[in-house]
Image (cartoon, grey):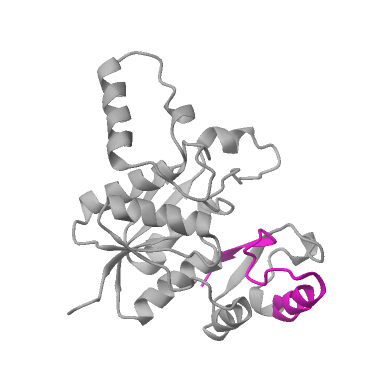
Amino acid sequence: MNNNYKVVALVSGGKVSCYSMFECIKFGHEIIALGNLYPPEEINKENEEDNDELDSYMFQTVGWNVIKSYEECLGVPLYRQCISGKPKEIGLNYDNNKEEIEGKNNNKNEEGKKENNSDEEHDEVEDLYELLLKVKREHPEINAVSCGAILSDYQRLRVENICSRLNLVSLSYLWQRDQEELLSDMITNNFNSILIKVACMGLSPEDLGKSIAKHYSKFMHLYKSFRMNVCGEGGEYETLTLD
């Protein structure tokens, strides 16, 4: 039985989503397309300090404006979806289903010109559904999704929920990997990922723009001192992969 999948890779620009795509290729799968979710324009216009981060439980949006370059660099099409929803279903399990969402959308269409409150009515996870639905329509051969979850059941279960509704397989090759080993593997495989946000004790604005390779020993020190997640799974830092 052939288990080589045609994959759409979810990419945020961070090291984890990019390395998950790398692992898919290593295991013989083919990357057909890239998928990205980005913050709405009004968020970016309102931010006076050039802070493009959205308050999302699911998606990294820091550095979103660089993602369009990935299409040219990797030679595969990029599909994008604006994050118009909010984190509404914030329990561990996510029980929204296709029939409920489609029913709501049909009702909205029938109501026609009634006031549209869709931004407040749907969960941000449904923006991922819309993104993958769009990709599947353009590439019906796609049968799997690359997911960069490492420790977050919240994120993993939501991606799996969307995949099950679209008859896709969720590929989470980084799931519960030892973080020290994983970070070391990224560096060994020459991932040029730089820090673009820091948010923990021991890291400062002076660390921004520097690579994970240069920070490896510092991350190990912070792990031993404060039990910091060395891959940044606790939001300690965010990265952008340049190569």
Q: Please give the range of residues in magenta.
A: 215-243
Q: Position of residue 6 (x, y in %)?
A: 25, 67
Asked if residue 12 can be seen in this view, the reply is no
Q: In the image shown, does 108 or 70 lie closer to the viewer?
A: 108
Q: Is residue 236 above or below residue 222?
A: above
* Image quadrant where residue 72 sits: bottom left
Q: Residue furthest bottom?
A: 188
Q: Is residue 143 above or below residue 128?
A: below
Asked if residue 153 can be seen in this view, the reply is yes
> On the rendered image, what quadrant is the N terminus found in?
bottom left
Please tell me which residue is depicted at 49% across the width and 28% down the height of the picture: 120
Question: What is the tally of numbered marks visible in this picture?
Answer: 0
Please tell me which residue is depicted at 55% across the width and 79% down the height of the picture: 186
Q: Is residue 98 above or below residue 229?
A: above
Q: In the image shown, does 154 or 146 lie closer to the viewer?
A: 154
Q: Position of residue 50 (x, y in %)?
A: 66, 44
* Magenta-colored stretch includes residue 242: yes
* Magenta-colored stretch includes residue 231: yes
Q: Residue furthest top?
A: 114
* Image quadrant where residue 117 sits: top left
Q: Position of residue 179 (x, y in %)?
A: 61, 76
Tell whether 83 sits left or right of 97: right
Q: Is residue 137 above or below residue 13?
A: above
